[in-house]
């Protein structure tokens, strides 16, 4: 039995009370239409929403939505409300306001069992990661932010079920716990307890497969898990693998280099050099890549670089090399697809890796919006042992870093457990 250091839904009585619920329904979007293409995080948020409304809460949901590659964050949550309404088979009201007078009026009028979704939290500067990183407010200081000072007085309880955003120290994640009795939702409980159990005695060898486009997560954890020996191998794909190649002194070709420079990812080249020097036996990178050559997939070895088409995937030799390691792994953690899997010419590597992981004997844990979307599209999710909603949060949890949300829920436990009805 795991020691509990956060309050759960059973600790409070929600009948007729106003409850503010933070979820993470940040979902992969179709790049052109900006429509939601994967509903996994919405599905996984349903049980807490149901439980709270079944228990008589007047429920207000807050959440954020980012954009596919860049943090544009200008996407409305209207579609999320429509999908939630369908799945819950009851109306989920929506207002295009986050914490202004219109939202506050609507919250005050909410009746028992009703649900209201407020608009994208990231419309507020104080909720954007850049603000978090530059301004560095403490949770106590965040109680003075626009969001918290306007919403907190309207609520009896705060519930956080957004494990996937646990690495974000934003007001919506860590400040309401200072002011309101706060519990963790069912998904938070499931994610945290499963990951703690898996990490207690990880079967060896422990293999991390790191790809995708959000590479700061991978780079934030690589050194730690390699230095502490928690990873036996890190297999790189996606943009992380491209950075490894540049760090090795290879030229990739102008379209790929432009892709990297446009996103400011050159800053990862120096750290990559250090990791490759110190952990050459554990940190593996692709032997070959694929490009889209006039609509057809064409593979080329890394010796054939640079190339005047953008690199969109890993090649067959790399897949073969990684297969040997993945088949022997005791545990496999996956974050990020291997290539541009949305296009058929770039999907082969991701599809093959999901096939290999699906039949590997080791315990597999995967996480992250695009990771899950790619596994649903190209693999078989039922063959994965644990599907975590978190990408960045999972990666940091695995590397033993302190997560702002986990710390905030611990503080809330100390502050509010005297109100628990289980006492
Ligand atoms: C995620 O997808 O990792 C979480 O929803 C957090 O989103 P963010 O990276 O835009 O903060």
Image (spheres, rainbow, N blue to C red):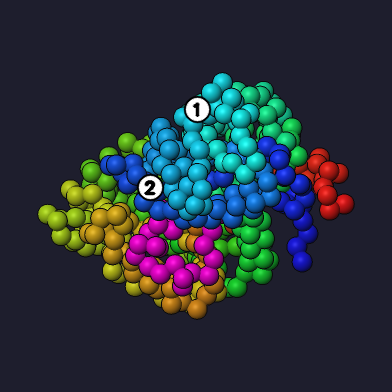
- 78 is higher (above) or lower (below) than 364: above
Query: Could you tell me residue 13's position as x and y percent?
Result: 76, 46
Q: Which residue is mark 2?
A: 36
Q: Quadrant of the N terminus?
A: bottom right
Query: Residue 414 sits in which quadrant?
Result: top right
How far from the left and from the top, in percent, is residue 392?
52, 49
Q: Which mark is residue 56?
A: none
Which is nearer the eye, 379 or 133?
379
Q: Which mark is residue 97?
A: 1
Extent of the magenta region: 370-394
| Dominant SS type (magenta) | helix
Q: Nearer the viewer, residue 25 or 402?
A: 25
* For residue 265, side relative to residue 343 (left or right): right
Depth order, front residue of 109/214: 109
Q: Secondary structure at mark 2?
A: loop
Q: Is residue 123 left or right of residue 8?
A: left
């Amino acid at each position: 039995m795991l020691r509990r250091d956060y309050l759960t839904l059973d600790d409070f009585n929600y009948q007729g009370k106003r409850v503010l619920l933070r979820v993470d329904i940040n979902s992969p979007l179709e790049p052109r239409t900006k429509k939601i293409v994967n509903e996994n995080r919405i599905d996984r948020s349903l049980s807490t929403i149901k439980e709270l409304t079944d228990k008589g809460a007047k429920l207000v949901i807050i959440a954020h939505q980012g954009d596919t590659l860049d943090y544009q964050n200008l996407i409305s949550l209207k579609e999320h409300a429509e999908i939630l309404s369908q799945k819950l088979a009851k109306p989920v009201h929506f207002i295009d306001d986050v914490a202004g007078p219109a939202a506050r009026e609507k919250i005050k009028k909410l009746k028992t069992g009703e649900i209201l979704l407020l608009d994208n939290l990231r419309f507020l500067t104080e909720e954007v990661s850049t603000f978090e990183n530059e301004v560095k407010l403490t949770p106590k200081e965040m109680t003075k932010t626009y969001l918290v000072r306007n919403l907190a007085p309207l609520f009896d309880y705060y519930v956080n079920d957004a494990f996937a955003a646990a690495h974000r120290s934003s007001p919506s994640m860590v400040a309401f716990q200072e002011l309101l009795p706060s519990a963790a939702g069912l998904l938070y409980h499931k994610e945290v307890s499963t990951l703690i159990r898996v990490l207690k005695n990880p079967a060896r060898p422990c293999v991390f497969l790191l790809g995708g486009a959000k590479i700061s997560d991978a780079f934030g954890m690589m050194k730690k898990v390699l230095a502490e020996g928690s990873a036996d191998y890190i297999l790189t794909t996606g943009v992380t693998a491209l950075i490894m190649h540049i760090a090795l002194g290879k030229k990739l070709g102008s379209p790929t280099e432009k892709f990297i420079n446009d996103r400011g990812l050159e800053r990862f080249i120096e750290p990559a050099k250090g990791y490759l020097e110190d952990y050459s036996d554990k940190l593996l990178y692709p032997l070959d890549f694929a490009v889209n050559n006039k609509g057809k997939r064409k593979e080329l070895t890394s010796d054939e670089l640079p190339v005047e088409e953008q690199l969109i995937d890993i090649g067959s030799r790399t897949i073969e090399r990684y297969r040997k390691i993945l088949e022997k792994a005791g545990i496999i953690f996956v974050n990020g697809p291997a290539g541009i899997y949305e296009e058929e010419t770039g999907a082969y590597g991701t599809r093959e890796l999901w096939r290999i992981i699906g039949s590997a004997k080791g315990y597999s844990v995967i996480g992250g919006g695009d990771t899950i979307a790619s596994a649903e599209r190209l693999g078989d999710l039922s063959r994965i042992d644990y599907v975590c909603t978190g990408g960045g949060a999972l990666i940091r949890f695995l590397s033993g870093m302190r997560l702002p949300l986990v710390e905030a829920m611990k503080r809330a436990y100390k502050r509010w457990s005297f109100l628990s009805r289980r006492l």
